[in-house]
Amino acid sequence: MAHNLTRRQLGLNALRAAAALGITRIGLGAAAAAEPPAAPYAPAVVVGSGYGSAVAALRLGQAGVRTVVLEMGRLWDTPGPDGKVFPSTSAPDQRSMWFRHRTEAPLAQFLWLDVVNRDISPYPGVLDRVNHGGMSVYVGRGVGGGSLVNGGMAPTPRRSYFAEVFPGVDAGEMYGTYFPRARAMLGVNDIDPAWFESTEWYRFARISRKHAQNTGLKTTFVPNVYDFAYMKREAAGTATRSALAGEVIYGNNHGKKSVDKTYLAAALGTGNVTIETMQRVVAVRQDPAGGYVLTVHTSDVTGRVTQVRELGCKQLFLGAGSLGTTEILLRARETGALPALSEKVGLGWGPNGNVMTARANHLWDTVGCNQATMPALGIDDWDNAANPVFAEIAPLPMGIEHWISMYLAITRNPERGRFVYDAATDSARLDWTRDQNAPAVAAARNLFDRINRRNVTIYRYDLFGDNKAFADDFTYHPLGGCVLGEATDAYGRVKGYQGLYVLDGSLVPGSLGVNPFVTITALAERNMERILAQP
Ligand code: FAE
């Protein structure tokens, strides 16, 4: 354990040193900074640096395999002009979003007014919203991927639903070994219930719980990777505020255990792993001599491609997320670079049944001016066979009393989308129409109509644009595209090709019933163990 901590500390030091020097190659010691550009070959290359990639990097590094991680975003460890790494949610700037002229926050309005979004200058910011017509997908960009911008909620799926979603995976092994391993490495922790009951920062959640309980519904605490002990110190005024200062979707300056602080720091600590930033993998082909050759674009902060290079590898681990990984493989299949890829690549995509909604409370049911940004409680009606919903009670920290209860509902929407390769733009287009989210809206409406009826409350129509009570046009949980056991074998080994693996959210067939990163991490742990033993 002491050995591990020291190794992780070494990795963290490497990340800090790299940030201070403003370099794009991060490895152990000063040597990495001074090294010439990467050799055109590495035994293993990992694409992306989110959850799946971070697991791959650590386990490869520990196995002694020299590994290069390529991430299209930047390293988030250098303070900006305001002295902070990430901008505040209330005053977003160029760091907030990936090459935008204006922020695109999930909550577009307040009282129908466009008071939320701000003009910004284009820059490789931390949050991206990838717009695909009927569905927009929020993703994180930078070393750590989605872990930099997410709400940290870390539930483990209900075992029966996991077994239904992944009939080919041994649930006993997952729940006995890999979920506990992932939770421990990610730093999952629970809120102190006594503190939850007493603190003003979770009054908003207690009010929603009261209304759920009035309706005969169950609530449950949701674990998180935000350090709740740190949050208590924020509340006591002894630590710099982050979750209690409105920080979340544009990054947390403190308190959150994003994977750059856990898995990736430990991976760098092995001494075998190097992370390269602002590197976008645009193509992959087979090397006639064995292995793969990647085409990689290096960009500067204006988005200009400053270098196009090729990098060879024996083993290629794709962790670019549901959108990124699927696009890389679909493009490879459709352009003939990897023609033996399965017809299943591109299929089985879903938004995890995500729908957001909000209710207006009575004047006496105040939700409080002070709200922690990390959700800690959910309404668990998943056992309702006719209408399963897991609805997280989301904060809306505006620093004023607004009497709003917000929710992210995860529903069981059977609809699936598919990615289609568009040769004109050389990109993967998501084929998903707005009406495909109707089952998710119907499920959420069923639950919240009951809550509203019982508590004599109404929906808010001013928050999501177009006078709608349900936000059905975006997701935080893109899942699928290279489904486990379909486009890959039962362990993420891509069908048709040796030494090519998928390790991220694209393995999950569109629905999970809870927030996905613990499952993505645990599956990656399981798959990496097998891949290292039987490549
Ligand atoms: P991901 O974390 O998306 O990482 C992919 C990485 O690959 C990114 O860093 C990309 O920049 C990079 N990349 C993509 N394409 C390329 C390329 N061609 N070349 C090089 N690099 C590339 O993948 N989940 C939860 O479980 N709990 C939550 O509370 C939660 N809240 C969320 C809130 C927000 C605002 C968002 C956006 C997401 C949230 N999620 C949450 C979802 C979660 O972050 C997501 O499922 C995982 O991050 C997906 O992990 P992957 O490993 O699939």
Image (cartoon, rainbow, N blue to C red):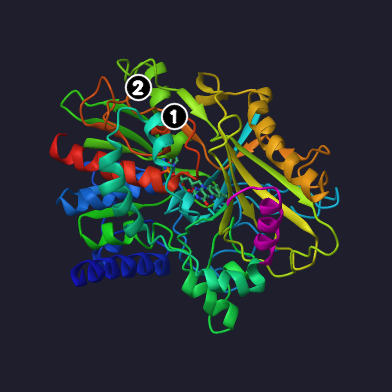
**Contact (Cβ within 8 Å) of mark 1 with mark 2:** yes
Question: Residue 391: where, in percent of width, then height?
Answer: 61, 46
Q: Residue at x 21, y 48 (%)?
A: 60
The amino acid beneath tag 2 is: Glu
Q: Is residue 63 left or right of residue 278?
A: left
Q: Residue at x 41, y 65 (%)?
A: 19
Residue density around tag 2, few if under 14, some if 14–19, many if 20 or more, within 10 Å: many
Magenta span includes 207: yes
Q: What secondary structure is marked by label 2?
A: loop
Q: Earlier in the sequence, mark 1 or mark 2?
A: 2
Question: Residue 371: where, in percent of width, then height?
Answer: 67, 66
Q: Is residue 9 left or right of residue 357?
A: left
Residue density around tag 1, few if under 14, some if 14–19, many if 20 or more, within 10 Å: many
Q: What numbered label is drawn on residue 509?
A: 1
Q: What numbered label is drawn on residue 486?
A: 2
- Region of the chain picked out in magenta, as a range: 203-218
Q: Main secondary structure of the magenta part?
A: helix
Distance from disc 1 to disc 2, alpha carbons, whole Å, reads: 10 Å
Question: Residue 398: where, in percent of width, then height?
Answer: 74, 63
Give 285 or 205, whichever is nearer the viewer.
205
